[in-house]
Image: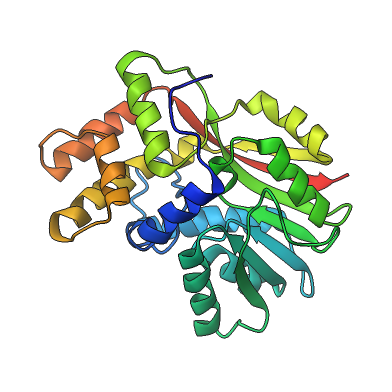
Amino acid sequence: MSVDYKVPTPESVGAFYDRANTVIAHVQGGNMHYGYWTGPDDDSDYETAGARLTDLMIERVDARPGDRVLDVGCGPGRPGVRLARTSGAGVLGISVSEQDVRLANERAAAEGLAGRVGFQVADMLDLPFAADTFDHAMALESIVHVPDRVRALSEISRVVRPGGRVVLTDFTVRSVPGGRTGETFAGVLDSWRAAEPVRVEDYQGFAEQAGLVIDEILDITDNTKYTGLWTYLELRRYARENAVPAEVQQIIDAVPMPDVSDEQLVAGWKKLLDGEQMQGVIIVRAHVA
């Protein structure tokens, strides 16, 4: 697919999260990634839904005490800290955002895990680690900011030992947007500094080029599709009472909403979600060849 949008760079992504991550984490229950709902009747809050998706990733990484896990694109650190606490593994997280790294290290210290969990500024396209440094890697909604998936996967594969697991989420395209819908889609990509979604069938080739073997591709679109509804609703509510950075206002403006009550908005959005989704979400579990 091809839409007219600004291609993100590590610099633009880092600057975006430096300024917007506090607000995004606030409305997304402390995380900065999609939530996982069991269905349309699941009334879980975002914190619960986000923890579910984190746990799906942690289960697939399957780290053990003493393992060393690379958290690629750590955000404010909640998934990496949760992985370390539940598995006993050591975690090193990276982000292109200095603010992400500061918040993540503060979280690790607050939870008494600073000796086993740490975070630093680094770019997934040029990881500052020797080959085979880590036992496993987790990339929870971070590769979505990288246009060159193969380069990112190759770097991750290089620093994870042979046989080590690599677990990630990515956005996929299910239908090619056109007209006004395409313009809105491009605006959403721009506002989140996201790269174009890929096709599910592309991942086999990506993995082979990067030295990875695919073990599982799980489509979780039906469970994550409520993320947009709750994210934009909560951002709109937050912005009513608080000044927000220009980056957050751009996110809100990218998806025009009718001037109706929140209840009417939720009802209308849920009706739209009953149809085919233009963008999908997958979990990819692989291992280094």
Horizontal relation, residue 255 to residue 145: left or right = left
Picture coordinates of residue 120 (x, y %)? 61, 68
Residue 71, by quadrant, is bottom right
**Residue at image coords 31%, 27%:** 272
Residue 2, position as x, y percentages in the image: 51, 20
State the image coordinates of residue 93 (x, y, percent, origin top left). Answer: 63, 65
Residue 127 drawn at (x, y percent) = 71, 56
Residue 51 appears left or right of 248: right
**Is the residue 137 above or below the residue 215 in the image?**
below
Residue 186 quadrant = top left
Camera-side residue: 276 or 193?
193
At a point 18% along the width and 61% down the height, the residue shown is 242
Against 40, is 185 above or below?
A: above
Quarter of the figure that contains the C terminus: top right
Query: Is residue 104 something one can see in this rendering?
Result: yes
User: In front here: 289 or 49?
Assistant: 289
How many marks overall? 0
Q: Is residue 66 above or below residue 132?
A: below
Residue drawn at (33%, 51%), measured in percent from left and top?
Answer: 43
Residue drawn at x 57%, y 69% as measured from the top left: 82
Residue found at the far top of this picture: 179
Horizontally, residue 81 falls left or right of residue 69, namely: left
Residue 226 visible, this orientation: no
- Name the one closer to the observer, 249 or 45: 249
Place residue 286 in its image quadrant: top right
